[in-house]
Amino acid sequence: MLTAVEAIIEKNGKVRLQQPVHLTEPCRAIVTILDEKSEIISETALLSEASLSDWNRPEEDEAWSHLQKVQ
């Protein structure tokens, strides 16, 4: 079973879990370090922009308008 737990990693490498974790035995883990200060736009978003720009037209809005919720 996979479980995700948020944590803070200190500069010295110490990991502080943000919530208690109760294990019956030692377990392996994968740590992903998130760079929250980075404002880099993902490569996928940049590559998708050109192909999706064709959908940003009034004709497309009209074609799909029947799927919009009635307000």
Image (cartoon, rainbow, N blue to C red):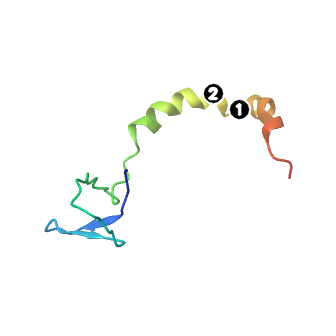
Question: Residue 46, relative to residue 33: is it above or below?
Answer: above
Provide the residue designation for mark 1.
57
Residue closer to the observer: 9 or 18: 18
Evaluate if marks 1 and 2 touch, with contact meaning CB atoms under 8 Å apart.
yes
Q: CA distance from mark 1 to mark 2?
A: 7 Å
Provide the residue designation for mark 2.
54
Instruction: Determine crowd level at label 2: few under 14, some 14-19, many 20+ residues with C-alpha closer than 10 A.
Output: few
Please name the residue shown 32% across and 56% down the image: 34
Q: Position of residue 22 (x, y in %)?
A: 32, 69
> Label 1 sits on what residue type?
Arg
In the image, 65: left or right of 49? right
Question: Residue 41, relative to residue 49: is it above or below?
Answer: below
Kind of element beneath mark 2:
helix
Q: Position of residue 63 (x, y in %)?
A: 79, 29
Question: Residue 5, relative to residue 65: is it above or below?
Answer: below
Residue placed furthest toward the left: 12
Q: Position of residue 20 (x, y in %)?
A: 34, 73
